[in-house]
Structure formats: structure tokens, C-alpha cells
Image: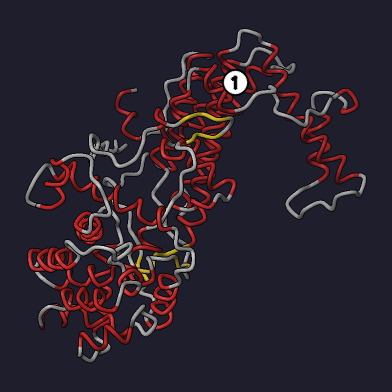
Amino acid sequence: MVKKKKNNKNKDNKNYSTLAQHQIKGKKLIPPFLQIPNLQITSWLNERLPEMLWAALLITGLKRDDALNIFRRVAKVVEGVEGIGPVDVTHTGIMALSADLRDRLLHAICSDITARNALRPLLLLKGLPGYEHWVRVLNITPVLENWQDLKVAVAHTLDHHSQEATDCRWVRVLVKVIAGQLKLPDLETVKELIYYPNYGDMRKVRPMIRSVEGTFSIIDNNKSNTWPEVFWDQCMKDTECEVGFIHYIGGQIKPGTTRERVSQTRKALVAHYKQTLRTTDVDAEHEGTFGLAAYALAILDELLRLGNSTAILGRMGLRALLECYVTLAYLSSEKDKNIWQVYRTYGAGQAKLAFLKFDDGSVTPPDYVRIETLEFLANEDRWLEFTEINVGHWDNSNLRSMSEKAGVKAEYDRYYPWTSGFIHGNWAAVRNVSFDLCMNPLHRLHRIIRDQTNTLEDVLPDACVLVDKILEVVDKRYPVFPERVTVEAISSI
């Protein structure tokens, strides 16, 4: 069986918090940012990137140093200017300035022919704030090919952490500082900003720029600004989706077992069951142990059928195997032998509950159910009139608590969260299976329903791990049973 290498990339430079840094409130884990009182969240992608398109086009259409020099020239325009009100070099902010300052800023941005060519895609956007002023200053005609230039600019700045996005955010902060409308805490920080990106430790400077720029939208809180929405709407209407699929790169795929090996193991399990049988009376412990093991082997056998282990059903099967393992481990860890009978009686009670609902006509039986089977199972150990129905959990517990008591919490944490999403149809699982990604950056990498079912990563190696753990419990309770399903384990048996 293939052992996946742990991915330690970015281990010491994470841009997200660990579970330990989350705060527990009831049944929710709250990340550090959401613990900040009165936090307001703004979106670079949805709201602020469309406002800085001019900067994005320059930083991606010119050499970086040339674009940064234009940004510095833009900041120079507001140096020493007094009584001008709030200054912001967003598209909406520039048009809110006096006519004189607006035109000076526009001429600084469109300072030469190379800059004007890079900015030409702006003229495709008829809803752009001050569109007529950009037409006048650029004095150039856009062509359809300019949509591709716009795609490139947005693609490089979609991620608010990217170098290009940080450069765009830097000019916005720089202008505020030069205009005397933003005070920085000390001279060192001022120098880091003024001489960016050639001064200071960029691992500290870049996050500082992004943090400061992010506060501007919270302060301005301009709810009436419709330009970002207008921009994204036009991009959706005037450009086509570009369907793409992100393929997950894993290790070399090796089947963990074969159907022949599973069949051999099952035959060995049957033989060992007979060998360890001590009574023909109800033996909840013996039958429960071997029954769960046989059930797990049946699931594994189904996973080996063509396509199942890389399908949605594969994740459901893995989730079922986990529950079998935790249940068996929990039952085996309890000193009170009566717990096995509790587990067994609960199952009979569930068969009784279903039978009675179908029998009285209050519920129409589905096609897959035979009422006679339910009646037989409900009556098998004793007359169903002596069987109570527990509508809660059979141990008044839950799988997580059982895994902790049984000492198998590591397996629970490893297999439960993601597989359960597929059982319950949680959004992340639905998204993973049902959608492709539109690779057109002007569509914000939105989702597109797939025309075929997605092939998922293979669960078979993990299923073999869980089945072998179940067989280990069988071996421990009823020695000696060395059989395992994992192919590589055969040589060591």
C-alpha cells in the first residue's frame, strides 16, 4: 500500500490559523479574525480589484519597475496639495476629485504611449467611472483583443496576496501617506513604504501594505458604489466561460488489495468463526465481532468493483468502514459484556421500528425493502413484543465519544470529517463532485456544473487500512487470526 508523503510546504509560513488557535463557542470553532469585535469584512476580489484596474493593467502590461515608477509619479501629484479632501486613487475616487487634480492624476497615469497601450482595455468598459475622461486622456481605440490583456491583468491580481496585487495596493497606501491623510507609526515604516520594494524585509512590509490598504474600504464604507458590480456583470456578459478542471496530484496509485485476496480472507474468517464457536445460543459478543468483520469485508469487496473506489459511493463506503471499526473497537474496550447485547438489541429494535411503520400502512415501503425480512430480523432473538425501540444512539453516545473511549480517535479524525460530507451532501462535497472551475479570470473563477461525474481520488488503500484494523481486533479477541487484506502485508504474515 502506498504511503502518502506529508506535505510540509509552507509549514512555517502559513497564512491561516491552526485549529488550536480557534476558539470553542458551543459547537463552533471560531478563527482568530472572527474573534475581533465589530469586525467588518471587505473583499479585494469582488470590491476593490475593479477599482484598481488601471494599476493592475500597468503592473502586468509593463515592466514592474516602469509600472512602479508611474505609481510614484501618481503619488507625487498629491504632494503638498492642501484642502483637497479625501484622496483615493481608485477609479471612483479619482472621479470624485476636483477637475484639475483629477486630470493631473490621469495624465500622470497615462504618461507615455506604452502606458496608454497597456491601459487601452479600460475603454472596453463603458460603465467605468469617468469613462469619457479616460477616453479623452488615452486618445486610443480599444480592440477586441484587449479583453485578453484584461484577463491577464485580473488573473495576476485575483489573489490579494500576489505580488502584483500587493503592488496595486501599495500605490493606494502611498498616495494617502504622501497626501498627508495617513499617519504611519514611525519613520522606519514610512521608509519601508516610500522605498518599496527596495527597503526593509518584504516578509514584513508586504503584509503591512495589505493590512493598511484593507482598512480603507472599511473607513470609506461607500455602499453606493456600484462600479465593481457593473464591471463583473459586463465581464460575464461580454466574455465566454473557459471550463477547466483542477486535477488533484497524488502519489502513485497502487491497489491496496485484490478481490481474490478479499475472498481468501473472508473464507479464513468463516473458518475461524466456526473454530471459535462455543454455543448455538445467542452470543452477542462472538457474532458481533465476526459479523462486523464480515460486513467490512463485504464493503471492501464492493469498493473493488469497477469505478466504486473513485466515486461518491467510495467515500460513503469508507465512512461506513470507519463506523464499523470505531464500533468494534468501542465494544471491545468495554468491560461490561452486556454492552454487546445492547448493541444487538438496538439493531433488532430498528428493524422492528421500520417493520411496524410499514405494516400499519402509515408509510409506503420502498421497493428495496421486503417487509418479511424486517419482521424476521425483529423477531429473530425473541418475540418483538419483548424488544424495545431506542430512537436515539444505541449507546446514548456518538461516534466521536466512542472513538475517544476506545482509543481510536486518531482514525476518527483521519477519516470522519471529509467522508461524512459525502454522506450528508454537505456543500464542500457537492462542490467537489458536481462542479468544474471557469478558468476565465474575468468570471472570478466561478463554478460550472460538470456534464459528467467527477472521478475522485481512490479510497481503496485507506479502506484496506480500516479493514485490517478490524481484523486485528478479531485476532485480539479470538486468537489466532493472522489474515489481512492488504497485499503487501501478506509476506509478513
Between residues 42 and 318, which one lies in front from this camera angle? 42
Quick one: quadrant of the C terminus? top left
Question: In this picture, is 406 found above or below 308?
Answer: above
- Among the 4 quarters of the image, the one containing residue 216: bottom left
Residue at the top extreme of this rendering = 335
Where residue 420 sits: x, y (%)?
54, 41
Which quadrant, please, contains the N terminus? top left
Residue at the extreme right of the image, as rendered: 360
> Which residue corresponds to the image point at 14% horizontal and 41% vertical from the top-left?
187
Relative vertical location of residue 136 with respect to residue 161 in this rendering, above or below: below
Where residue 141 appears, as percent x and y from the top left, is 23, 92
Query: In the image, what residue occupies the spot 35% across and 51% down?
Result: 215
Q: Residue 260's x, y, as percent? A: 43, 41
- Quick one: 230 or 84, which is closer to the camera? 84
Q: Secondary structure at mark 1?
A: helix
Q: Residue at x 18, y 71 (%)?
A: 58
Residue type indicated by callout 1: Lys
Question: Where does the image place residue 479, in percent across and percent down from the top left?
Answer: 49, 13
In this view of the protein, can residue 300 be seen by the observer? no
User: Few, some or many C-alpha atoms within 10 Å of disc 1 (few <14, some 14-19, many ≥20)?
Assistant: few
Q: Nearer the viewer, residue 45 or 426?
A: 45
> Based on the displayed image, in which of its 4 quarters is residue 443 positioned?
bottom left
Residue 101 placement, left or right of 261: left
The residue at which mark 1 appears reads as 274
Q: Residue at x 78, y 28 (%)?
A: 390
